[in-house]
Amino acid sequence: MGIQNITNKTENDVDIYTLNSLRAEFLTVNTVILGVYLVIGVLGNSLVFYIYKCCITKHRTDRFFIPYLAVSDALSCIVGSGFGLALNLLPIRFSGDALCKGLWFLTKWSTLVSALMLLLIAIERYKKVCKPFGPQMTPLAKQLSIIALFVLSAILTFPTVFFHGEISFPARGTSHLTGYRCGRNTFLTGLEGYFTIYNVVLAAVAFTGITAVTILYVFVGKTIYKQTKFRSRFASSPRKSYISPKSDSGVVSDGNDDVFLENSVKENEENKARKDSADSFYSTDDELESTDADLPRKKSSNNPRKKSIISHVYTVPQVLRKFKISILFMCITLVFILTFTPRLVIMISEATNKGYWSGLTDNQIRASLFFYRFYIVNNIVNPFLYAAFDSRFKQEIKKRLSCFKKT
């Protein structure tokens, strides 16, 4: 039953509870979707936190942010979906000004935390993949950065408490019933102009963040592409013996087919280009899944005139495996951008059109609410991306499932 049909009820036919039920029924589809978000998001991200924090003890450097991201995703699902459910189930019976302000604050704060964490991860990936010889983020620096983004998110979100609160209004179709809802109250407090400015600022921050993340991952993607292309071309070219000395970071560049490489006095342009590219690739030390064990090794030769170095070759699939955590975070960020963009568009529409919601039809209201909360999909899909890209996570899941079946 649509909202317009409620006006056909007479005052004697409806009370506040009946009217609330009718409006809640109008939003049933949206309510079911939010319930699915809540269940999948909490269970999936709780599992992610447990696996990465308690089970995966090796190579935690590259996976440092994943448990924190899982916590922010779970929090965003709990607050975002839970608050949305409350608004849908109590459309005209939501009372409590402090509760309303707090929930609006937590919803926007948790969303901003997830967004800024993706920006922080993008910076860390850029430094690790594109600037492997430069200063990297230490564990302490990462922890301090997380604390800083939590505080920054709270500062940017705090004005929300002035723009939202409990609103009392005459229930539609009645003259003696008073309804209560939680929403924007700027038309009552006279803060409409400030709300517009605040929404514009948030939209600018979101746009700047999305642009920055996109640029950083473009550089990361170009580096991965160049290394993949280099390995593909190098593997298909005639094998040549040359030595690639240790890089500034102390990582020895790898040659082809575990042969001994000689350090010549004068390298031609082709060998020099290969050396530089190999140094750049093998010094990234990114997501070191133990591909080394799969590669054959040859015994070294005792030649006093040559400096012998045993090394191994990485094939193109192994190159992609080597960068898979970076590719994982790129996919997570892409999903976030795609799911958050509709909310950003609606936020801009709210800021520029005071009567945005009141001018919508029933179906348009349902669709707008769906896209306004569509960003939660980003929080629930991340566990599936971890399973798709991180073999260690998948192995731990299978191990726990096998133990569960035995019991």
Image (spheres, rainbow, N blue to C red):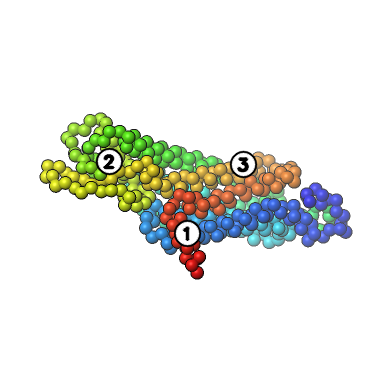
Q: Secondary structure at mark 3?
A: helix
Identify the mark at residue 260; answer none if there is no mark.
Answer: none
The answer to whether marks 2 and 1 mark residues whose Cβ atoms lie closer than 8 Å is no
- Specify the farthest residue to the left: 304
Q: Residue at x 18, y 45 (%)?
A: 308
- Specify the farthest residue to the bottom: 407
Question: Hey, what amino acid is under mark 3?
Answer: Val
- In the picture of the structure, the residue carrying the numbered disc 3 is 345
Image height of 76 relative to 214, above or below? below
Q: Residue at x 55, y 53 (%)?
A: 380
- In the picture of the structure, the residue carrying the numbered disc 1 is 397
- In the picture of the structure, the residue carrying the numbered disc 2 is 256
Q: Residues within 10 Å of mark 1 (few under 14, many from 20)?
A: some
**In the picture provided, is 170 more to the left or to the right than 43?**
right
Residue 119 in percent (x, y) is at: 47, 47
Residue 220 in percent (x, y) is at: 41, 41
Residue 88 in percent (x, y) is at: 69, 55
